[in-house]
Amino acid sequence: DAKTTQPTSMDCAEGRAANLPCNHSTISGNEYVYWYRQIHSQGPQYIIHGLKNNETNEMASLIITEDRKSSTLILPHATLRDTAVYYCIVRRRGSQGNLIFGKGTKLSVKP
Amino acid sequence: DAGVIQSPRHEVTEMGQEVTLRCKPISGHNSLFWYRQTMMRGLELLIYFNNNVPIDDSGMPEDRFSAKMPNASFSTLKIQPSEPRDSAVYFCASSSGLAGGTDTQYFGPGTRLTVL
């Protein structure tokens, strides 16, 4: 699976949009981009995934660049409860194995 | 759905004792994963099962660790004997293992193990 690069930490004001970037320049055509987050002392939580089209669900939006070498997770109206470590993971289609978690981005939402 | 259920949520034991962690996956899911999280190593896979059969146990640290999945709704991770370096949070996750597609993994709340 392709390697990802994320900033170590980011701050966001409560109520504003949080935009979390991820670089995956070596991604191949059959690899998806997944986002998980881990709130302190909880298990990782699935957020969203996509292949090449932008995706939106009740939690977030995922914007993938046309060349697929980077993506951005958008939390439209961040709340204090969105403070967590966010992981960007690239994963091959049909892969049945484990998720490889990097260090992720520590997002701190401040009042 | 209740999600992935793990028990106990916290376990404190003394070195040398046997520890058993339990997991109930989401109903209908056919893949189950055991992960361990420490500050030093982050989240790492220990073992995963597909249709109750162990597929990859290369992450199991040593013979002191064993995992079973006797049926589709239950799995155990056992450490015997336990050591202080086993102290970590152990997560269980399950997925539907869609053939030819993607399989989103859903995690349980974890078991925080402390070995004194």
Image (tube, rainbow, N blue to C red):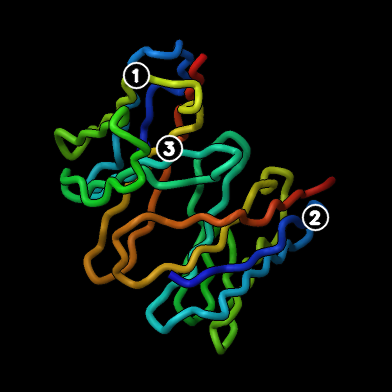
Which one is in front, B106 or B3?
B106
Q: Is residue A91 above or below residue B88?
A: below
Residue A50 lies, in percent from the top left, at: 47, 72
For label 2, the crowd category at 10 Å Cα-Cα, with few meaning under 14, some 14 to 19 and many 20 or more, is few
Residue at the image position 82 percent from the left and 47 percent from the top: A110
For label 3, the crowd category at 10 Å Cα-Cα, with few meaning under 14, some 14 to 19 and many 20 or more, is many
Q: Secondary structure at mark 1?
A: loop
Which one is in front, A26 or A110?
A26
Picture quarter containing residue B70? top left
Three-letter amino acid code at the position of disc 2: Asp
Q: Is residue B92 left or right of residue A24?
A: left
Residue A76 image label: none
Q: Is residue B62 above or below residue A23?
A: above
Residue at the image position 51 percent from the left and 20 percent from the top: B114
For label 1, the crowd category at 10 Å Cα-Cα, with few meaning under 14, some 14 to 19 and many 20 or more, is some
Three-letter amino acid code at the position of disc 3: Phe
Q: Is residue B99 left or right of residue B112?
A: left
Question: Residue beneath label 1, please?
Answer: B81
Question: Residue beneath label 2, please?
Answer: A11
Question: Residue beneath label 3, please?
Answer: B91
Which of label 2 and label 1 is nearer to you?
A: 1
Whether residue B77 is visible here, answered yes or no, is no
Chain bearing mark 1: B
Which of label 2 and label 3 is nearer to you?
A: 3
Chain bearing mark 3: B
Picture quarter containing residue B91? top left
